[in-house]
Structure formats: C-alpha cells, structure tokens
Amino acid sequence: MQDWIINVWGVRGSMPAPSRDFLEFGGNTACISVDCGEALVVFDAGSGLAALSRRLRTGRPIHLFLSHVHIDHLMGLFVFSQLHNPDAEIHLYGEARDGSSFRQQLEVLIGPPYWPVGFAGFAAAVTFHEIGPEQTLPLPGGLAVRTMRSNHPNLSLLYRLESAEKRVVYTLDCELTEELRPRLVEFCRDADAVVWDANFTAQDLALHPGWGHSSWEQGAAVQRDANVRLMLMTHYNQNYTDGFLREQELLAQGPGIRFARENMEVRL
Ligand SMILES: [Zn+2]
Ligand SMILES: [Zn+2]
C-alpha cells in the first residue's frame, strides 16, 4: 500500500507572521500538500506555497484546491514558480461566487495592476475547475476529493481526499456550530488525518463569534467523536507566539493530536 505524505508549508491564518516569535511553528499562511504517489494534492495557496515550490521535485500534475479566496489562502500564487514552468501541469479548483467565475476571481488579483504577470502570461498549462459543495471529484490513481460547504464568510469549501485505503480531511476555514457539527463529524469520520482550523483557543473563540474560525478544543472533541487517527491543528491566529502555542499544545496533549509546524512531514 502506497504511503501518503502530508507536508506542512504554512500554518498561519490571516497574515504571515515573519518574526522571531513565530519561528518554531512558522509564519507562513495556509498551505498543505498530500503526496499520494500518483497525484500531488495541495490544499490552499497561502504564502507557504512558496516553500513548496522551492522544494518541489515532480513532473506530475499538481492538483491545487482552494478552500476560498481570502487573501491568506491565495497569496502564495504570486510566487508559485511552477506557473512559469512550461512543463508544469497545474489544476486549480475553486468555486464561483458573487457572479464571478472561479477563474475571474483569480485573474482580478493575480495580474496588473496588482501583480505584473497574470494567467495569460504564465508558461505552465493551467486548468481551472469550477466546483461546488456536495461533489465528488475523481483524481488520478483511484483518488477522489469530496466537498462540503463550510461556515465561513464569503463561501468556503471543506475537502475530503480519499482512496480505497486512506482519507485526509481539510477543514480550513470553518467556524463550527452546533448545527454544522453532525455533518462535519460525518465528513471527518474515520479519517487518517484531519487538518483542523485551530485559529482560536476556546477562550478567544468566545470573543469572536461569526469570524468563521474554530478552536483547537473543538478539534479535539471532533477527533474523539469522528474516530480520527490524527488531528493536525493549524491556521493559528497571527498573534499566537511560539510560547503561547507551546502552552496550548501541552494543554491539548493526547493521542492523535498534533500542532502543525512548518516543514513537518507526516507519513500515513
Ligand atoms: Zn484563512
Ligand atoms: Zn478565510
């Protein structure tokens, strides 16, 4: 059975945090890849995508799923060097919103006047896949990605990557509510790993209802209820320092709970 390898490239929410207080966990925004052997799947294009593109050694197609188009999940596309590689095949997945196609949303931001080069100028073969909630998208190698509507401002999708043997769920960005909980628990059911929106502590979450994020405490509860093997906390608030996150990590400690750090590699 082929191992899957999760690589963590960015762990931060909202804005990069490039200073010495954030070096241990990392200061780049959301980006995680899952190397499934036959396919390289990437979730979100935060500033961590720049690190992935530096390390990338693949002639395989890249399947990049955007949960939504908030800037912290997109900013890595500006410097995604594979877009300039004429041999690269890149599939971008995301949804239409507010009357704009998925492609139009990206073209507004990535291109003049916000950026000197746009999709018309990239050398890579880029395919836009407009997707929505409650879909099952086949990928090469017998893989599939299922989608679910998140609870987050301006529309966001949750993803479940699965093969016959393995399952990884990606829940950025999402505010867990009692109404959403049963469906989300089912979406996470029996996953080998869930990448969890741990933007807040429970205490801070109570001060930010409606901001579209969850807490690590909620993730720990979902891990138990959904029989998740590994709950990987990430998308940390941009103000949470290494010292603070280490404290939370100690409070959270339990089998199958890990706090993501940049450059972490998890083999499933
Ligand atoms: Zn975010
Ligand atoms: Zn967001």
Image (spheres, helix red, strand yellow):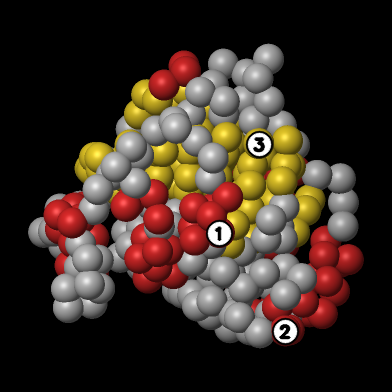
Disc 2 target residue: 20
Name the residue beneath numbered marker 3: 5
Crowd tier of the residue under label 2, counting other residues whose Cα lies within 10 Å: few below 14, some 14–19, many 20 or above: few
Please tell me in which quadrant of the rendered image residue 244 appears.
bottom right
Give the CA separation, mark 1 to mark 2: 18 Å
Image quadrant holding the C terminus, namely top right
In percent of width and height, residue 75 lies at: 40, 68
Q: Camera-side residue: 175 or 67?
A: 67
Secondary structure found at label 2: helix
Residue 266: where, in percent of width, then height? 72, 42
Residue at 82% of width from left, 65% of height from top? 249
Give the foreground label among 3 and 1.
Answer: 1
Amino acid on which the number 1 mark rests in the picture = Ala
Residue at coordinates 78% horizontally, 53% vertically from top-left? 258
Q: Earlier in the sequence, mark 1 or mark 2?
A: 2
Q: Which residue is mark 1?
A: 51
For the residue marked with disc 3, what is the amino acid?
Answer: Ile
- Helix, strand or loop at mark 3: strand
On whether ligand 1 comes within 8 Å of the CB at mark 2, the answer is no
